[in-house]
Amino acid sequence: MRLVLACSLLLAPAFAFAADIEFVRVWPGWREAESFERIAEYFGRGERTSGRETVLRTQPERRAGYYFLVRIKSATAVPGATLQLSVIRPDAPDPKVYRFPTTTALPTKEAVYQLGLTGSDWPEGEKANPVAWKIAILNQEGRVLAEHKSFLWEKPAK
């Protein structure tokens, strides 16, 4: 009995930590390069990829692509978090996995990320949509803290 109690006390923080992070919304869709242009760029400043939204791309030099607008709510800061996006594209039946390391800790509040499949990572153009997708938040050790997926990602239970 003591062993069960000790194990539950040791594991409780890990489960509580994972439960404190949630996906508020995931909104996938195509974005043209021009939709990222801001007035500051006309005055010689480069693209700002952080601020209200953090923009992370598979090919940073390419702006046009298929993006996942991801809003995350976290009760605790998560240093070294990685957003992992798995996508089944219309041109291939096997999932492709993309990892987007966050440059700063996942904040203790809501955060918004634009995860972009750009350049040759989304060759289908604006008319194509993924067949299915899954997004996971991983901690520094690679453990899944939260995940969200499209309804076609897995077969329903019988």
Image (spheres, rainbow, N blue to C red):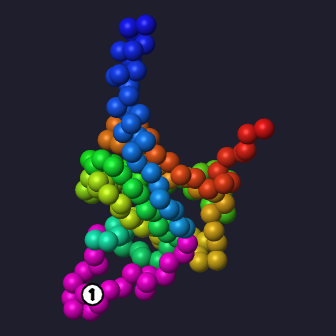
Q: Is residue 14 above or below residue 61?
A: above
Q: Front-most of 76 and 67?
A: 76
Q: Is residue 66 above or below residue 9?
A: below
Q: Front-most of 45 and 107?
A: 107
Q: Image point 40% across, 21% down: which residue?
A: 8
Residue labelled with disc 1: 41
Q: Front-most of 14 and 99?
A: 14
**Image quadrant occupied by the C terminus:** top right
Measured from the top left, where is residue 33 in percent x and y? 44, 82
Q: Image point 32% across, 41% down: which residue?
A: 140
Does the magenta run of residues contain 47?
yes
| Residue 46, image quadrant | bottom left
The segment highlighted magenta reads: 29-50
Measured from the top left, where is residue 16 in percent x and y? 39, 36
Q: Residue furthest top?
A: 1
Measured from the top left, where is residue 151 in percent x and y? 66, 54
Q: Front-most of 91 and 129?
A: 129
Mark 1 secondary-structure assignment? helix
Q: Can residue 104 be seen from the camera position used here?
A: yes
Q: Is residue 48 above or below residue 7?
A: below
* Badge 1 density bin: few <14, some 14–19, many ≥20, Cα 10 Å: few
Lateral position of residue 18 relative to residue 158, left or right: left
- Identified by mark 1, the residue type is Glu
Q: Residue furthest left?
A: 44
Q: Can residue 142 be seen from the camera position used here?
A: no
Q: Image point 43% across, 42% down: which residue?
A: 19
**Image quadrant occupied by the N terminus:** top left
Does the magenta run of residues contain 55?
no
Number of marks drawn: 1
Q: Is residue 60 above or below residue 14?
A: below
Q: Residue furthest bottom?
A: 42
Measured from the top left, where is residue 83 in percent x and y? 41, 53
